[in-house]
């Protein structure tokens, strides 16, 4: 039989046990809520990531289709039209009884115009300077054209050890810088453009900047054109950051890992042609 002291001890212990039990329940409840919050945040992040991936895919398809449409228009409006006119001229010459130097000169001019258009379209599909001279000289040519078009001052700084980049990566960088230069010419009202390319160990760092009026808030919130650039960079598992600098103007920074040429070639298969 329990003594009065033992009964008093049990009586005192029961409330403490109840409090401890409630505290334990509270801790378990808080832990469950904490876990639920973590899972919810993870799901939200995954949903945002998935949505952004869908937007990138949509942008890629849109850019590709716009490029195909532009090429088709060039082929139809320039090459097809010039060849049709040339064929008509040749048909008329066939029915003429006398030699007509003037008409022959007209046909020759049409053929030369057609050849020039063919070279231009071919250059846009695969720049000759890039395949023959390399990335640096191809970019110098682009910048020279920008200077002639808008009376700009341009600068390019390339590290001595950036060479031996994978071919697909050089094409992607050429496309990226080409689009950035075109955007500056069309919208920025800039007076200078600066490009730098630097390789440090297994990382490639690229930077583009101008002193124009910068991006609008809409484009800063990931405009379609900038998404297409980011998609090219992400194809090589790289990072792209852009914005308006404190001094005024626009900047774009690119960082791409260079583990090996084989690895970059595999990941580059997803890049935009």
Image (cartoon, rainbow, N blue to C red):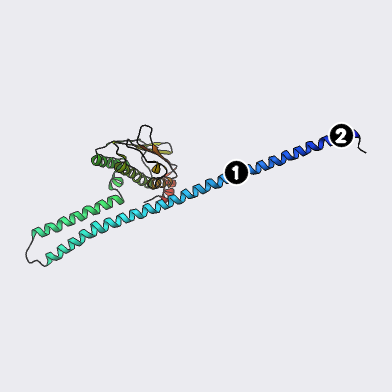
Q: Whole-percent x and y of residue 76?
A: 26, 59
In the picture, residue 16 is in which quadrant? top right
Instruction: Name the residue: 18% across, 57% down.
Output: 111
Viewer-side residue, 26 vs 81? 26
Q: Is residue 119 left or right of residue 94?
A: right
Which SS class for mark 1? helix
Which residue lies most toward the right here? 1
Q: Whole-percent x and y of residue 197?
A: 36, 37
* Residue 205, visible in the rendered structure: no
Viewer-side residue, 243 vs 145? 243
Viewer-side residue, 213 vs 243? 213
Distance in Å between CA atoms under marks 1 and 2: 44 Å
Point out which mark residue 37 bears: 1
99, above or below 12, in the image: below
Which residue lies most toward the left here? 98
Which residue lies most toward the top here? 247
Q: Is residue 60 left or right of residue 100?
A: right
Instruction: Name the residue: 60% across, 43% down.
Output: 37
Q: Whole-percent x and y of residue 157?
A: 33, 35
**Label 1 neighbourhood size at 10 Å, few (<14), some (14-19), many (20+)?**
few
**Label 2 neighbourhood size at 10 Å, few (<14), some (14-19), many (20+)?**
few
Decide which of tag 1 and tag 2 comes sooner along the chain.
2
Which SS class for mark 2? helix
In the picture, residue 110 is in which quadrant? bottom left
Q: Is residue 20 left or right of residue 54?
A: right
Q: Whole-percent x and y of residue 143?
A: 28, 40
Q: Which residue is mark 2?
A: 8
Q: Which quadrant would the N terminus be assigned to in this image?
A: top right
């Amino acid at each position: 039989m329990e003594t009065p002291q033992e009964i008093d001890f049990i009586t005192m212990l029961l409330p403490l046990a109840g409090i401890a039990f409630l505290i334990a329940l509270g801790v378990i409840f808080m832990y469950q809520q904490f876990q639920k919050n973590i899972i919810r945040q993870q799901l939200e992040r995954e949903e945002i990531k998935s949505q952004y991936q869908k937007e990138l895919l949509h942008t890629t398809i849109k850019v590709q289709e716009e490029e195909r449409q532009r090429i088709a228009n060039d082929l139809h409006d320039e090459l097809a039209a010039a060849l049709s006119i040339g064929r008509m001229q040749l048909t008329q010459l066939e029915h003429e009884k006398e030699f007509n130097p003037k008409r022959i000169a007209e046909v020759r001019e049409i053929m030369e115009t057609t050849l020039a258009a063919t070279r231009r379209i071919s250059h846009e599909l695969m720049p000759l300077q890039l395949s023959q001279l390399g990335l640096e000289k191809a970019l110098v040519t682009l910048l020279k054209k920008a200077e002639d078009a808008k009376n700009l001052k341009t600068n390019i700084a390339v590290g001595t050890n950036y060479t031996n980049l994978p071919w697909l990566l050089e094409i992607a960088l050429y496309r990226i810088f080409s689009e950035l230069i075109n955007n500056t010419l069309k919208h920025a009202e800039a007076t200078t453009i600066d490009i730098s390319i630097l390789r440090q160990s297994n990382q490639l760092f690229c930077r583009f900047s101008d002193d124009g009026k910068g991006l609008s808030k809409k484009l800063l919130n990931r405009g379609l054109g900038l998404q297409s650039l980011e998609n090219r960079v992400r194809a090589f598992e790289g990072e792209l950051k852009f914005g308006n600098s404190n001094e005024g103007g626009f900047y774009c920074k690119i960082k791409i890992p260079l583990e090996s040429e084989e690895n970059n070639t595999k990941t580059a298969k997803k890049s935009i042609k």
